[in-house]
Image (cartoon, rainbow, N blue to C red):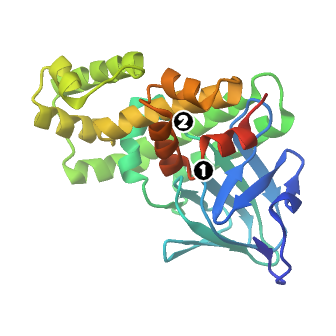
Amino acid sequence: MSQKKGVEVSARAARHIDGYRVLEGKREYVTYQGDSSIRIWYSDIPWRYETHDHSAVEIVLVLEGTVTYSVEGTSYPVRKGEVLIVPSNTPHSLEMGEGSSRYLFLFETDTIMTMRDIKSMVLYLHKPFHLRDESDAHKQIRELLLRAKDFYEKQELMWNTACYSCILQVYATLGRHYLIGIRSRTGDTVRSMDTEVINAVMTYINDHYREDLRLDDVAGFSGFSRFYFSRSFKQQTGYSFKDYLCQKRLQAAMDLLTSTNLSMRGIAVESGFGSTASFNRAFRACKGCTPTQYRAVYGML
Protein backbone atom coordinates (compact mmCIF):
# COMPACT_ATOMS: atom_id res chain seq x y z
CA MET A 1 0.00 0.00 0.00
CA SER A 2 1.61 3.27 -0.98
CA GLN A 3 0.78 6.92 -1.26
CA LYS A 4 0.48 8.53 -4.66
CA LYS A 5 3.84 10.27 -4.20
CA GLY A 6 5.50 6.87 -3.92
CA VAL A 7 6.17 6.94 -0.17
CA GLU A 8 5.81 3.45 1.25
CA VAL A 9 3.41 3.09 4.17
CA SER A 10 3.55 0.09 6.49
CA ALA A 11 0.40 -1.86 7.28
CA ARG A 12 0.20 -0.64 10.86
CA ALA A 13 0.98 2.96 9.91
CA ALA A 14 -2.34 3.28 8.09
CA ARG A 15 -4.24 3.80 11.32
CA HIS A 16 -7.76 5.05 11.82
CA ILE A 17 -9.60 5.87 15.03
CA ASP A 18 -11.32 2.49 14.93
CA GLY A 19 -8.40 0.26 13.93
CA TYR A 20 -5.92 -0.31 11.14
CA ARG A 21 -5.40 -2.35 7.98
CA VAL A 22 -3.04 -5.31 8.25
CA LEU A 23 -1.37 -6.59 5.07
CA GLU A 24 0.40 -9.89 4.63
CA GLY A 25 1.58 -9.99 1.03
CA LYS A 26 -1.53 -9.12 -0.98
CA ARG A 27 -3.93 -10.43 1.67
CA GLU A 28 -5.54 -7.82 3.90
CA TYR A 29 -6.90 -8.55 7.36
CA VAL A 30 -9.45 -5.94 8.33
CA THR A 31 -9.65 -5.10 12.02
CA TYR A 32 -12.97 -4.28 13.64
CA GLN A 33 -14.03 -2.67 16.89
CA GLY A 34 -15.13 -4.89 19.75
CA ASP A 35 -17.77 -7.40 18.68
CA SER A 36 -18.51 -5.65 15.38
CA SER A 37 -17.76 -6.93 11.89
CA ILE A 38 -18.17 -3.75 9.86
CA ARG A 39 -15.91 -0.75 9.25
CA ILE A 40 -16.91 2.54 7.62
CA TRP A 41 -14.67 5.50 7.11
CA TYR A 42 -14.35 8.72 5.17
CA SER A 43 -11.29 9.80 3.21
CA ASP A 44 -10.38 12.70 0.97
CA ILE A 45 -6.63 11.95 0.82
CA PRO A 46 -5.19 11.08 -2.61
CA TRP A 47 -4.06 7.48 -2.24
CA ARG A 48 -3.34 4.45 -4.36
CA TYR A 49 -3.99 1.06 -2.81
CA GLU A 50 -2.08 -1.64 -4.65
CA THR A 51 -3.73 -4.94 -5.56
CA HIS A 52 -5.03 -6.77 -2.50
CA ASP A 53 -7.98 -8.88 -1.39
CA HIS A 54 -9.83 -9.60 1.83
CA SER A 55 -12.71 -11.69 3.17
CA ALA A 56 -14.91 -8.61 3.56
CA VAL A 57 -17.21 -7.22 0.89
CA GLU A 58 -16.11 -3.70 -0.06
CA ILE A 59 -18.53 -0.94 -1.03
CA VAL A 60 -17.41 2.54 -2.07
CA LEU A 61 -19.74 5.55 -2.17
CA VAL A 62 -18.07 8.48 -3.92
CA LEU A 63 -18.95 11.94 -2.62
CA GLU A 64 -16.75 14.09 -4.88
CA GLY A 65 -14.49 13.49 -7.86
CA THR A 66 -13.63 9.97 -9.03
CA VAL A 67 -12.27 6.84 -7.38
CA THR A 68 -10.96 4.36 -9.95
CA TYR A 69 -10.99 0.66 -9.14
CA SER A 70 -9.18 -2.03 -11.10
CA VAL A 71 -10.72 -5.46 -10.57
CA GLU A 72 -9.30 -8.48 -12.38
CA GLY A 73 -8.20 -6.39 -15.37
CA THR A 74 -11.36 -4.28 -15.65
CA SER A 75 -11.37 -0.58 -14.77
CA TYR A 76 -14.32 0.93 -12.87
CA PRO A 77 -14.21 4.75 -12.63
CA VAL A 78 -16.68 5.48 -9.81
CA ARG A 79 -17.88 9.07 -9.92
CA LYS A 80 -19.76 11.38 -7.58
CA GLY A 81 -22.91 9.72 -6.25
CA GLU A 82 -22.05 6.30 -7.72
CA VAL A 83 -21.65 3.06 -5.77
CA LEU A 84 -19.40 0.09 -6.49
CA ILE A 85 -19.73 -3.27 -4.73
CA VAL A 86 -16.62 -5.48 -4.82
CA PRO A 87 -17.21 -9.14 -3.81
CA SER A 88 -15.22 -10.75 -1.02
CA ASN A 89 -11.90 -12.44 -1.84
CA THR A 90 -11.64 -10.52 -5.14
CA PRO A 91 -8.24 -8.96 -5.96
CA HIS A 92 -8.58 -5.22 -6.60
CA SER A 93 -6.70 -1.94 -6.47
CA LEU A 94 -7.99 1.62 -6.26
CA GLU A 95 -6.79 5.15 -6.78
CA MET A 96 -8.23 8.40 -5.45
CA GLY A 97 -7.31 11.57 -7.28
CA GLU A 98 -6.94 15.11 -5.97
CA GLY A 99 -10.26 16.68 -4.93
CA SER A 100 -11.96 13.30 -4.50
CA SER A 101 -13.69 12.02 -1.39
CA ARG A 102 -15.56 8.85 -0.50
CA TYR A 103 -17.00 6.60 2.18
CA LEU A 104 -15.63 3.06 2.22
CA PHE A 105 -17.63 0.21 3.75
CA LEU A 106 -16.01 -3.13 4.64
CA PHE A 107 -18.11 -5.85 6.23
CA GLU A 108 -18.05 -9.59 6.77
CA THR A 109 -20.88 -11.48 5.11
CA ASP A 110 -21.02 -14.58 7.32
CA THR A 111 -24.11 -13.38 9.19
CA ILE A 112 -26.19 -12.14 6.27
CA MET A 113 -25.32 -15.24 4.23
CA THR A 114 -27.58 -17.25 6.53
CA MET A 115 -30.44 -15.60 4.60
CA ARG A 116 -31.33 -18.07 1.89
CA ASP A 117 -32.51 -15.53 -0.66
CA ILE A 118 -29.29 -13.54 -0.23
CA LYS A 119 -27.31 -16.74 -0.74
CA SER A 120 -28.98 -17.15 -4.12
CA MET A 121 -27.89 -13.62 -5.07
CA VAL A 122 -24.22 -14.55 -4.73
CA LEU A 123 -24.50 -16.19 -8.16
CA TYR A 124 -25.12 -12.74 -9.64
CA LEU A 125 -22.75 -10.75 -7.43
CA HIS A 126 -19.57 -12.71 -8.14
CA LYS A 127 -18.29 -9.71 -10.11
CA PRO A 128 -18.29 -5.99 -9.16
CA PHE A 129 -21.69 -4.31 -9.30
CA HIS A 130 -21.54 -0.66 -10.40
CA LEU A 131 -24.57 1.50 -9.55
CA ARG A 132 -24.66 4.61 -11.72
CA ASP A 133 -28.14 4.82 -13.26
CA GLU A 134 -29.58 7.37 -10.75
CA SER A 135 -32.75 5.28 -10.54
CA ASP A 136 -34.93 5.36 -7.43
CA ALA A 137 -33.31 2.08 -6.34
CA HIS A 138 -29.83 3.57 -6.76
CA LYS A 139 -30.81 6.59 -4.66
CA GLN A 140 -32.36 4.33 -2.02
CA ILE A 141 -29.16 2.28 -1.75
CA ARG A 142 -27.12 5.46 -1.39
CA GLU A 143 -29.41 6.65 1.41
CA LEU A 144 -29.16 3.28 3.17
CA LEU A 145 -25.37 3.43 3.09
CA LEU A 146 -25.38 6.93 4.55
CA ARG A 147 -27.78 5.78 7.25
CA ALA A 148 -25.41 2.92 8.11
CA LYS A 149 -22.60 5.48 8.27
CA ASP A 150 -24.61 7.56 10.77
CA PHE A 151 -25.22 4.51 13.01
CA TYR A 152 -21.51 3.69 12.82
CA GLU A 153 -20.38 7.18 13.79
CA LYS A 154 -22.85 7.59 16.68
CA GLN A 155 -22.19 4.07 18.04
CA GLU A 156 -25.28 4.02 20.19
CA LEU A 157 -26.62 0.79 21.69
CA MET A 158 -26.87 -2.03 19.07
CA TRP A 159 -25.09 0.08 16.44
CA ASN A 160 -23.51 -2.93 14.72
CA THR A 161 -26.93 -4.56 14.28
CA ALA A 162 -28.35 -1.25 13.05
CA CYS A 163 -25.57 -1.01 10.44
CA TYR A 164 -26.26 -4.54 9.25
CA SER A 165 -29.98 -3.82 9.02
CA CYS A 166 -29.08 -1.17 6.43
CA ILE A 167 -26.78 -3.61 4.60
CA LEU A 168 -29.59 -6.18 4.48
CA GLN A 169 -31.87 -3.56 2.95
CA VAL A 170 -29.17 -2.76 0.38
CA TYR A 171 -29.12 -6.42 -0.68
CA ALA A 172 -32.92 -6.58 -0.70
CA THR A 173 -33.06 -3.51 -2.94
CA LEU A 174 -30.45 -5.00 -5.28
CA GLY A 175 -32.44 -8.21 -5.52
CA ARG A 176 -35.79 -6.54 -6.14
CA HIS A 177 -34.70 -3.90 -8.62
CA TYR A 178 -31.63 -5.25 -10.40
CA LEU A 179 -31.00 -8.95 -9.98
CA ILE A 180 -34.51 -10.27 -10.55
CA GLY A 181 -34.20 -9.45 -14.25
CA ILE A 182 -30.91 -11.33 -14.44
CA ARG A 183 -32.45 -14.35 -12.75
CA SER A 184 -35.39 -14.48 -15.13
CA ARG A 185 -33.06 -14.33 -18.14
CA THR A 186 -31.00 -17.25 -16.86
CA GLY A 187 -34.04 -19.48 -16.60
CA ASP A 188 -33.09 -20.32 -13.01
CA THR A 189 -36.45 -21.72 -11.90
CA VAL A 190 -36.96 -24.52 -9.45
CA ARG A 191 -40.23 -26.12 -8.43
CA SER A 192 -41.68 -24.91 -5.12
CA MET A 193 -41.60 -28.46 -3.74
CA ASP A 194 -37.85 -28.59 -4.36
CA THR A 195 -37.47 -25.28 -2.54
CA GLU A 196 -39.20 -26.64 0.57
CA VAL A 197 -37.04 -29.76 0.52
CA ILE A 198 -33.78 -27.83 0.11
CA ASN A 199 -34.78 -25.48 2.93
CA ALA A 200 -35.34 -28.52 5.16
CA VAL A 201 -31.95 -29.93 4.10
CA MET A 202 -30.20 -26.65 4.98
CA THR A 203 -31.77 -26.75 8.45
CA TYR A 204 -30.66 -30.38 8.77
CA ILE A 205 -27.07 -29.47 7.83
CA ASN A 206 -27.08 -26.51 10.23
CA ASP A 207 -28.13 -28.86 13.05
CA HIS A 208 -25.75 -31.72 12.19
CA TYR A 209 -22.62 -30.11 10.70
CA ARG A 210 -20.49 -31.45 13.58
CA GLU A 211 -21.26 -35.00 12.44
CA ASP A 212 -19.72 -36.98 9.56
CA LEU A 213 -22.23 -35.79 6.94
CA ARG A 214 -21.90 -37.29 3.47
CA LEU A 215 -23.57 -36.38 0.21
CA ASP A 216 -25.35 -39.73 -0.09
CA ASP A 217 -26.74 -39.43 3.44
CA VAL A 218 -28.10 -35.91 2.92
CA ALA A 219 -29.48 -36.76 -0.53
CA GLY A 220 -31.24 -39.70 1.10
CA PHE A 221 -32.70 -37.39 3.73
CA SER A 222 -34.03 -35.15 0.95
CA GLY A 223 -35.63 -38.06 -0.88
CA PHE A 224 -33.85 -37.05 -4.11
CA SER A 225 -31.27 -38.93 -6.08
CA ARG A 226 -27.65 -37.90 -5.52
CA PHE A 227 -27.52 -36.13 -8.90
CA TYR A 228 -30.87 -34.34 -8.62
CA PHE A 229 -30.17 -33.22 -5.07
CA SER A 230 -26.73 -31.84 -5.99
CA ARG A 231 -28.13 -29.87 -8.92
CA SER A 232 -31.13 -28.50 -7.00
CA PHE A 233 -29.03 -27.57 -3.96
CA LYS A 234 -26.55 -25.65 -6.11
CA GLN A 235 -29.33 -23.83 -8.00
CA GLN A 236 -30.97 -22.56 -4.83
CA THR A 237 -28.02 -21.82 -2.56
CA GLY A 238 -25.21 -20.99 -4.98
CA TYR A 239 -23.04 -23.57 -3.19
CA SER A 240 -22.31 -27.24 -3.73
CA PHE A 241 -23.25 -29.43 -0.78
CA LYS A 242 -19.56 -29.86 0.07
CA ASP A 243 -18.87 -26.10 -0.04
CA TYR A 244 -21.96 -25.22 2.02
CA LEU A 245 -21.04 -27.74 4.70
CA CYS A 246 -17.45 -26.47 4.74
CA GLN A 247 -18.61 -22.84 5.07
CA LYS A 248 -20.91 -23.78 7.94
CA ARG A 249 -18.05 -25.53 9.75
CA LEU A 250 -15.66 -22.65 9.09
CA GLN A 251 -18.14 -20.15 10.52
CA ALA A 252 -18.43 -22.24 13.66
CA ALA A 253 -14.63 -22.46 13.84
CA MET A 254 -14.20 -18.68 13.43
CA ASP A 255 -16.65 -18.07 16.26
CA LEU A 256 -14.68 -20.43 18.51
CA LEU A 257 -11.35 -18.89 17.50
CA THR A 258 -12.47 -15.39 18.48
CA SER A 259 -14.53 -16.19 21.60
CA THR A 260 -12.79 -19.15 23.32
CA ASN A 261 -9.31 -20.36 24.22
CA LEU A 262 -9.92 -23.87 22.89
CA SER A 263 -6.94 -25.60 21.30
CA MET A 264 -6.85 -26.00 17.52
CA ARG A 265 -7.64 -29.68 17.92
CA GLY A 266 -10.61 -28.86 20.13
CA ILE A 267 -11.91 -26.33 17.61
CA ALA A 268 -11.44 -28.81 14.74
CA VAL A 269 -13.56 -31.37 16.61
CA GLU A 270 -16.22 -28.91 17.77
CA SER A 271 -16.70 -27.46 14.28
CA GLY A 272 -16.99 -30.84 12.53
CA PHE A 273 -13.61 -31.23 10.85
CA GLY A 274 -12.18 -34.73 11.01
CA SER A 275 -8.69 -33.64 12.03
CA THR A 276 -6.56 -30.62 12.77
CA ALA A 277 -4.83 -31.07 9.41
CA SER A 278 -8.08 -30.97 7.41
CA PHE A 279 -9.24 -27.99 9.50
CA ASN A 280 -6.03 -26.07 8.80
CA ARG A 281 -6.17 -26.91 5.10
CA ALA A 282 -9.81 -25.82 4.67
CA PHE A 283 -9.30 -22.67 6.73
CA ARG A 284 -6.27 -21.53 4.75
CA ALA A 285 -8.00 -22.23 1.43
CA CYS A 286 -11.02 -20.12 2.44
CA LYS A 287 -9.53 -17.29 4.51
CA GLY A 288 -5.99 -17.10 3.11
CA CYS A 289 -4.37 -17.56 6.52
CA THR A 290 -3.98 -20.19 9.23
CA PRO A 291 -6.43 -20.44 12.16
CA THR A 292 -3.64 -19.28 14.47
CA GLN A 293 -3.05 -16.15 12.37
CA TYR A 294 -6.80 -15.45 12.28
CA ARG A 295 -7.03 -15.71 16.07
CA ALA A 296 -4.05 -13.37 16.47
CA VAL A 297 -5.85 -10.65 14.47
CA TYR A 298 -9.49 -11.14 15.50
CA GLY A 299 -9.32 -12.95 18.83
CA MET A 300 -10.80 -11.15 21.82
CA LEU A 301 -9.01 -13.14 24.52
Name which residue lies at 69% across and 30% down: 258
Q: Earlier in the sequence, mark 1 or mark 2?
A: 2
Along the line of sight, which residue is nearer the eye, 271 or 221?
Answer: 271
| Residue 112 placement, left or right of 217 | right
Mark 1 to mark 2 CA distance (whole Å): 17 Å
Q: Is residue 1 left or right of residue 255?
A: right
Is the residue 106 above or below the residue 97 in the image?
above
Question: Label 1 is placed on what type of residue?
Answer: Cys
Q: At 68% across and 66% down in the image, what residue appears?
A: 80
Residue occupying image coordinates x 76% and y 29%: 159
SS assignment at label 1: loop
Q: Which residue is mark 2?
A: 110
Q: Residue at x 21, y 45 (%)?
A: 188
Instruction: Give the amino acid at mark 2.
Output: Asp
Give the farthest residue toward the bottom.
5
Q: Which quadrant is the N terminus positioned in?
A: bottom right
**Most extreme residue toward the left, as rendered?**
225
Q: Which mark is residue 289?
A: 1
| Residue 275 horizontal side relative to residue 9, left or right | left
Secondary structure beneath disc 2?
loop
Looking at the image, which is closer to me, 300 or 270?
Answer: 270
Residue 78, given in percent of the width and then of the height, sits at: 62, 69
Position of residue 176 measured from the top left corner of the image (x, y, whole percent)? 41, 41
Determine crowd level at label 2: few under 14, some 14-19, many 20+ residues with C-alpha closer than 10 A.
Answer: some
Residue 67 visible at all: no
Up the image or down, 99 lies above or below 161; here it is below
